[in-house]
Each structure stands twice: as structure tokens, then as C-alpha cells.
Amino acid sequence: MSSQEKKLTGIPVVLMILGMVLLVVAIATLASQNLVGQDIAMAGSAGQVFIAFITGLTTGGLSCLAVQGGLLASSLAHQIEQDYLEQSAQQRKREKKHPVAQIRRSNTALPILLFLAAKLVAYTLLGALLGWLGSYFTISPTARAFLLITIGVFMIGNALRMFNIHPIFRYFSIEPPKFITRYIRKTAKGTDAVTPVFLGALTVFIPCGVTQTVMATALGTGSAALGAALMFAFTLGTSPVFFLVAYLTAEFGARLEKLFMRFVAVVVLILGLVTLDGGLNLMGSPLSPQNLIRNLVPSNDVSASAGESPQLPSLGNELVLYVENNGYFPSTLKAPAGKDLKLNLITNGTYSCALAFIIPDLEFFQMLSPVGTVQVEIPAQESGTALYFTCSMGMYTGQIIFE
Amino acid sequence: MIKKTFNVPDMHCSNCSMKLESIEDELAGIKEINASYHKQQMTVEFDETKVGEEQIIAAAKKKGYVAIPV
């Protein structure tokens, strides 16, 4: 291969990576602009889409690759084999003329791109379908909690499977039915453009744990458009990592695979724990890692009892909680037991998911305005008990301790 | 036709079962292969007059797996 030919084969890959980087920057800029906009609905939706994109970019790509990488590898394997045979034949011919000329594999970028494009379209349609289905029923915080706990356990099990801790964890890997694998296998033998496109679309049947979480969120949106936007943003976010790792793995072989799998296992384990924590928080469980840590580690972020706070002398039996972009402050409120109380939720330029405020034990849920105060009636509680509150994702949490 | 089960201890995901099952397209005389990542086994149904156990083991080895007859 001449040096000019070598340059030409490298161009699509460089352009592709540049394109993806530009796309990432463009979407991040758009989303951040929407986030500081005035319309709460728009800001909330844009925020969700942005979070989905970042989730895809940071962890989804690796997690998806762990599950769906095999499918991509199947579509690439034949291409690589053919390129190799083709190039070996060409090399033999060229070596006669130019003994120092080097052959470089170059055709793996296109099938990966086709695979990812098909995957993007398929998941966007799936997101629209889930959002549309979600519009017919509402997922209650409790149902969402069970969903998150199930997904969390599934992810932790999968991570332990990847670490090969015990044979029992193999059952966390879902084996697709034989007729599907057989069909995929027969399809993967093709070398035309249709094969990676078809296999990319088939990935909707083997979503990874992180994808499943975003799918659950898409279902919860209750809107086909938002569901599609969420899945599009997430899948788009997964694409650069997916592309780079797949491309490099195809180029450098399976040596990286073992190391890569370990890394994915660690990431999936952390994500699994975070998801489980979110689910337990949504149930108002004191056993969630966040609540356990809060109760074990003494913190300064604790209010005085209602009516005793020097900053809030006139509030009587009222509690004040500041709902901010990065959580609830103070995260621990102290209140007198045996008295009806009023909890004032104060927002001032808040646009994060902290606005979706939940007290699981009281079955209280309210979407707060970005600016304003909402008062929640808290019935009398027994001494020594605690009420936990959280955002609808189980990310931001806090508690009221009655004494 | 006979059915033979092999232990394949180094399968590490369900994609491995797909790879092992693809041997049925490559070796003449094999009717069906059912590989299970969960059980770390594959069951091969084959015509012993056309293909031998050694050939199946060699085909698995070519794909990066050690197949041990049960």
C-alpha cells in the first residue's frame, strides 16, 4: 500500500472521531443552555436528556460493549478475515515491486459505524415506544423503587460474574433463546453492509444494565418524544466509547479484552451499587448505603429542632428545607416527636431532579417550582423514629429525626 | 448419530456459547451443538462415521476453548 493510500484509509476514522467529539460538544452546549432556561418543563426534560447523554458517554458505552460487544465482533470478524486475506494477496504482489511496503487493516471502521447507526435508530424507536407505553400508566415511586432495586441487583450480580467470584453469578447473564442466537449467527456471516446494520438493530434485544435503567426512565417519562430523546441521547453518548474500544480491540486484538472486562466489571459494580442505593432511598429504607453512611458518620449538616434554630426563631412547629441543585440542605432535620409539623420546601433557582420531592413513608410526591415555597404537612411521629425524603431518582436524600 | 457432552470451563459470557455453536456450520457430520454458558458445557449431536471427538475438541481449541469430554 502506498503512503497516499494509507493516508486515505485513515481519514474516515479521524473524521468520524472528530465528528463525534463535535456532536458531543454541540449537544452538551445545547443541553446546558436549556438547563438554565426559564421553562421548568423544558429545563427538566433537557436535564434528563443531558444526564442520559452523560450516562451513555461515561459508563453506558463500556457496559453496553460488555454485553453487545460479541454481536459487533461477529459482524467484524468476517470483515477482518476477508481484509486480511485480501491484503495478504495484495501484499504478496506488492512485495515483489516494493519490498518495504506495509499493509494496514482499514475496513473495520465502516461496519462499526453502520452497527452504531442502526443501534441508534433502533434504540430511539424503542424509546418512543416505551414513552408511549408509559403515557398509559404512571410508575409510582414504590414501583420505581422495586425496578431500581431489581436492576441494581442484576448489575451487581453481573459485575460479580465478570470477576468470576462464583459459578452462581453466571445466571445473571441472560442467555438469549437458541433460535435467536442461531439466527444472529447465520446473519453475522454476511459481509455486506446489511449485516452490521441488522446486528446493530438486534442489540435492542440484549440491553445492558445501564441501558435498562435508561429504558425504565424512558418508560417513566410518559411521552413518546421524550422517551425517544432520552434513548437517542443515551445511545449517542455510548457511541464514541463503543466505537473507539471496538476499533482499537479489532486493531490490537484480544490482548486488551481481559483488562477491559475487568474495568467494565468495576464500573458496573459501582453503578449497580448506586442504582440499588437509589431504589432503597425511594423506598425510604434506612438501610440504603447513603442513609447508613449518614447515620454512621457524624455531620455538621444537621438542623436544630424546629423552633430552636437561631436562624429561624419565628417558625414554631415549622421546619425549613432548602432544595438546591445539588441536594437538600440540611440533610438531617431534627424535630419534636408527637406534634404535627409543617415542612417548608424552599427553592430558589433550582433546576435539578431535587425538584421531584418524595417522602416515601407518607406517600408524598410533589414536583416543585424552581422558585418558591411549598408547605408539607407532617403528621405527629413517635420519638426515636425517622422520616426519609429523596428525589424521584433516589439520588439526593435526607431525613427528619424525631426526638 | 450420537450425543456427547463436553465441559468447557473457560467460557466467560453467553457470546462464547454462540461461538462454540458455530462449529456446527464448520464441521461436516455435526447435526447440532447446544452450548450453555451457565453450565459451562456443550452438547454435540454428531455422526460418528463422519466426524470424531478429536476433531470437535480441535475445532473448539481453534476458537480458544478447551473442550473436555464428560
Image (tube, rainbow, N blue to C red):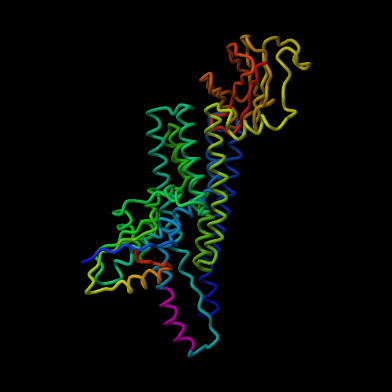
Question: In the image, what residue occupies the spot 75% across and 28% down?
Answer: A300
Q: Is residue A37 above or below residue A108?
A: above
Question: In the image, what residue occupies the spot 51% across and 63% down?
Answer: A247
- Region of the chain picked out in magenta, as a range: A83-95
In the image, A48 versus B68, the foreground residue is: B68
Q: What x and y, as percent, mark residue A1?
A: 50, 80
Q: Is residue A24 left or right of residue A141?
A: right
Hey, which quadrant is residue A199 in on the image? bottom left
Q: Is residue A334 left or right of residue A210?
A: right
In the image, A196 versus B42, the foreground residue is: B42
Q: What x and y, as percent, mark residue B11?
A: 43, 60
Q: Does residue B57 show up magenta in the picture?
A: no
Hey, which quadrant is residue A110 in on the image? bottom left
Q: Furthest residue to the front?
A: B70
Hey, which quadrant is residue B67 in on the image? bottom left
Q: Is residue A41 above or below residue A364?
A: below
Q: What x and y, as percent, mark residue A130?
A: 40, 37
In the image, A337 versus A134, the foreground residue is: A337
Q: What x and y, as percent, mark residue A306?
A: 70, 14
Q: Is residue A401 above or below residue B48?
A: above
Q: Furthest residue to the right?
A: A310
Q: Does residue A92 show up magenta in the picture?
A: yes
* Quadrant including the N terminus of chain B: bottom left
Please state the total of marks drawn on the protein image.
Answer: 0
Question: In the image, what residue occupies the spot 51% across and 71% down?
Answer: A9
Looking at the magenta stretch, what is its main secondary structure? helix
* Quadrant including the C terminus of chain B: bottom left
